[in-house]
Image: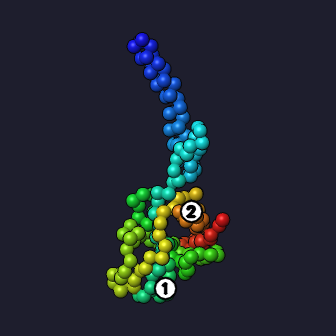
């Protein structure tokens, strides 16, 4: 009797290993391809939505030529913030933006005066986002609120354009 029970347990373990392997490999493949979630056996979600990167939009006023908005995005968890200067926010139509130097992560949380009389910044938007695609010349991303934004390099230098898509 004890031998039969032990054989049953061994059989269950051996039969469940391929199913567990399938679920893990599906999750890894889906994460690598950027899928938000994968329906596994039985209709259960294997992966939660991949919204692990952070962004912030700061309104920069005073001490600058003209008020503008700084769009800042992590490129990976813990990275400096890739930053663009925009004349408007929210972006509702194709807008010329300028790529500027990466900024410190502290700006994800900071609001207030800037050193050396460079004005002040006020947070107007922030949250999490995911990349839908990203190359050196074009970024497409979706924020947790559903905003889909494309940033595209145009010509030489720091000139880019931003556009909202559906």
Q: Secondary structure at mark 2?
A: strand
Q: Quadrant of the C terminus?
A: bottom right
Say if 113 sits above or below 103 in the image: below
**Where, by quadrant of the figure, is residue 118 drawn?**
bottom left
Q: Quadrant of the N terminus?
A: top left
Does 141 sit left or right of 65 as displayed?
right
Pick the residue in front: 95 or 14.
14
The furthest residue to the front: 1
Expressed as whole percent of the image width and height from the top left, the position of residue 10 reads 45, 20
- Say which residue appears at 53% left-offset and 37% top-offset: 23
Q: Would you name the residue on which mark 1 appears?
A: 67
Disc 2 from disc 1: Cα separation: 26 Å
Pick the residue in front: 7 or 118.
7
Does 64 sit left or right of 94 as displayed?
left
Is residue 32 among what the camera can see? Answer: no
The furthest residue to the left: 115
> Do the CB atoms of the residues marked 2 and 1 lie less than 8 Å apart?
no
Expressed as whole percent of the image width and height from the top left, the position of residue 152 reads 60, 67
Q: Residues within 10 Å of mark 1 (few under 14, many from 20)?
A: some
Q: Secondary structure at mark 1?
A: loop
Indicate which disc residue 51 carries. Answer: none
Q: Nearer the viewer, mark 2 or mark 1?
A: 2
**Where, by quadrant of the figure, is residue 122 drawn?**
bottom left
- Say which residue appears at 36% left-offset and 82% top-offset: 113
Expressed as whole percent of the image width and height from the top left, the position of residue 153 reads 59, 68
The first of marks 2 and 1 along the sequence is 1
Indicate which disc residue 142 carries. Answer: 2
């Amino acid at each position: 009797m004890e031998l039969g029970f032990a054989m049953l347990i061994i059989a269950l373990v051996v039969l469940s290993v391929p199913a567990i392997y399938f679920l893990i490999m599906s999750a890894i493949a889906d994460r690598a391809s950027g899928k938000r979630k994968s329906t596994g056996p039985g209709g259960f979600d294997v992966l939660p939505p991949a919204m692990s990167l952070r962004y912030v939009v700061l309104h920069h006023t005073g001490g600058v030529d003209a008020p503008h908005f700084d769009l800042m995005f992590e490129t990976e968890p813990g990275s400096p913030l890739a930053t663009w200067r925009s004349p408007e926010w929210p972006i509702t139509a194709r807008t010329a933006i300028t790529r500027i130097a990466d900024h410190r992560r502290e700006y994800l949380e900071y609001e207030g005066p800037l050193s050396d009389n460079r004005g002040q910044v006020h947070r107007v938007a922030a949250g999490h986002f995911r990349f839908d695609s990203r190359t050196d010349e074009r970024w497409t991303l979706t924020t947790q609120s559903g905003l889909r934004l494309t940033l595209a390099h145009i010509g030489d230098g720091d000139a880019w354009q931003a556009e909202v898509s559906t």
